[in-house]
Image (tube, rainbow, N blue to C red):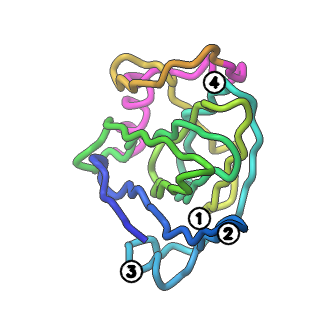
Amino acid sequence: MEVEQTNVADVLLIRPKIWGDQRGFFVETWQQERYAAAGINLPFVQDNHSRSRGGTLRGLHFQRRHPQGKLVSVSLGSVFDVAVDIRPDSPTFGQWFGAILTADNQHQLWVPPGMAHGFLVLSETAHFHYKCTDFYHPEDEGSLRWDDPDIGIVWPDSPARILSDKDKAAPGWREVREALLREKA
């Protein structure tokens, strides 16, 4: 597998080796020793699978006291996946990275604990997988507005943006940033 350090500290784009022939393909999506050598050595405690229709935008979500590291991938369709660094002590605090993950390319994104995370479905349907390092704690969840100009994520064109009510009401970066800095103090 190839592992690329992105412009955001600790966020890794992973290109697993794909073995294919006329029957189809095989890809190893997790192997503890190999991923630990790449710096992903936290224990995983929960796997999630979501299906979303085209134009759906989920995020940007995070947990405050129980931050989740996520190894994410797509098994059907394609998404634009985004991680925003919300760790106040990070040299890339407030910066984002995005990558297109597809069933064809089998790329994975390692989103370490302390990131806001979201994705936009680019295909008619997408099956999205999350391997998480902490349990989901709904009372601990926070969100960041997906289109905040202070973050400046450049989302691909999409015919629609289908968002949950929670995501439509998410606060902007200035409000989230101030809350994070207060909690850290």
Q: Residue at x 62, y 61 (%)?
A: 132
Q: Secondary structure at mark 3?
A: helix
Q: Amino acid at mark 2?
A: Val
Kindly identify which numbered label has been placed on residue 39. Answer: none
Q: Amino acid at mark 4?
A: Asp
Q: Which of disc 3 and disc 1 is earlier in sequence?
A: 3
Total residue callouts? 4
Kindly identify which numbered label has been placed on residue 133. Answer: 1
Disc 4 crowd, CA 10 A, few/some/many (<14, 14-19, 20+) = some
Q: Amino acid at mark 3?
A: Ala
> Quick check: marks 1 and 3 in contact, CB under 8 Å?
no
Q: Give the CA distance from mark 1 to mark 2.
A: 5 Å
Is 86 left, or right, of 32 in this rendering?
left
Q: Give the CA distance from mark 1 to mark 3.
A: 17 Å
Query: Residues in magenta?
Result: 162-185
Which residue is disc 2 drawn over? 45
Q: Give the CA distance from mark 2 to mark 4.
A: 25 Å
Whether residue 29 is visible, yes or no, is: no
Q: Residue at x 49, y 41 (%)?
A: 100
> Quick check: marks 1 and 2 in contact, CB under 8 Å?
yes
Q: Which of disc 3 and disc 4 is earlier in sequence?
A: 3
Which residue is disc 4 drawn over? 167
From the top left corner, tell me how far across and down residue 92 is, in percent: 26, 44
Q: Amino acid at mark 1?
A: Thr
Is 161 left, or right, of 39 in this rendering?
right
> Quick check: marks 2 and 4 in contact, CB under 8 Å?
no
From the top left corner, tell me how far across and down residue 87 is, in percent: 36, 47
Q: Secondary structure at mark 2?
A: loop
